[in-house]
Amino acid sequence: MSIADNLLKYKNELEAQGVKLVAVSKNHPPESVLEAYHAGQRVFGENLVQEMVDKQAQLPQDIEWHLIGHLQSNKVKYIAPFVKLIESVDSLKLLKEINKQAIKHNRIIDCLLQIYIADEESKFGLDFDEAVELLRSEEFAELKNVRIIGLMGIATNTAQEKQTSIEFNELKVLFEGIKVSFFRKEESFREISMGMSSDYKLAIAEGSTMVRIGSNIFGKRVIKHWKNKES
C-alpha cells in the first residue's frame, strides 16, 4: 500500500473516534511527507530538531509540526519560530528556555509535559510528583509565553497488553488529577498524547486524544539519513 493509502486508513479510523493523528516522519524524506500532505495530513511529528528545521523550510507552511523527541534546551531556539506543539517537556529548565525563545518571537508555544510511565530506564519524563511540583512552583507561574495543554507518555515496549494498558491508565488518572488541581478553568488543557503504531488501540481505550504513528504509514525508516542523498 502507498503512504496515502496507509494514511487514509488511520485517518478514517481515528477521526471517527475523535482522536488526532500525528504522522511521525522521522528519517523519511520530504517527498514522503509531501505525499501524506497531499492525502490530507497536516500534523507531523519529528524527533530531531535539525531534521524538523530542514523539512519545515522545504514543505508547505501550513504543516503543524510537533517535536516529540527528547529536546535539549540549547536547541529550542531553532524551532521556536514555527513549532506548533512540543510534546516532550520533561523539566522546568526546558520549559523556561521555551518561554524565553517564545518571547523573542512574540509567540505562546503550546507544550505537553512528558510523564515517565514506562518500566524502562531509557525513557525520559517527569515522574508524577515532579510534574505536580513543577506546576506548583512560582517559577512556572511566571512563564507567560508557554501554555501546557496536556500530558504525553510512552509505554513500556512489551508484548504484555495488560501492562501497557495499566501504564496508559495511570497517565489518564494523572491527567484528570492535574486538570482538577491546576487547569480547572482552562479549556485548552485537554490533550493526552499516548499510543504509537503497536499500541495505539490500547491507548485510545484508556483515553488518548492524540496518537503518534510512523512506520505503519511511511514504511520502514530510511537507515541512511535522507539528507545524505543530497551530498
Image (cartoon, helix red, strand yellow):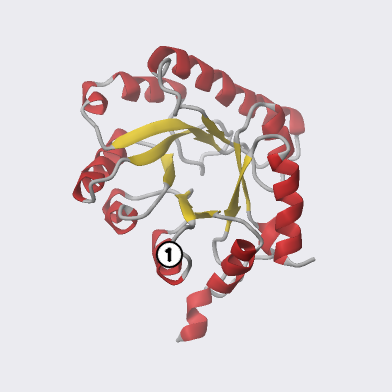
Q: Nearer the viewer, residue 71 or 200?
A: 200
Tag 1: residue type? Gln
Residue at the image point whose x is 75% and y is 43% from the top: 13
Left or right: 20 in relation to 86: right
Q: Nearer the viewer, residue 46 or 7?
A: 7
Instruction: Tell me if residue 162 comes above or below residue 50 in the rendering.
Output: above
Q: Which residue is mark 1?
A: 56
Q: Position of residue 216 (x, y in %)?
A: 71, 56
Whether residue 199 is visible here, answered yes or no, is: no
Residue at the image point whose x is 34% and y is 50% from the top: 72
Left or right: 143 in relation to 109: left
Residue at the image point whose x is 76% and y is 52% from the top: 9
**Quarter placement of the N terminus:** bottom right
Q: Position of residue 143 (x, y in %)?
A: 24, 32
| Quarter of the rendering containing residue 33 | bottom right
Q: Position of residue 63 (x, y in %)?
A: 49, 57
Q: Nearer the viewer, residue 52 or 131?
A: 52
Disc 1 element: helix
Whether residue 192 is visible here, answered yes or no, is: yes
Question: How packed is label 1: few (under 14 Cα within 10 Å), some, or many (20 or more)?
Answer: some
Q: Position of residue 192 (x, y in %)?
A: 55, 32
| Quarter of the rendering containing residue 203 | top right
Instruction: Tell me if residue 49 comes above or below residue 137 in the rendering.
Output: below
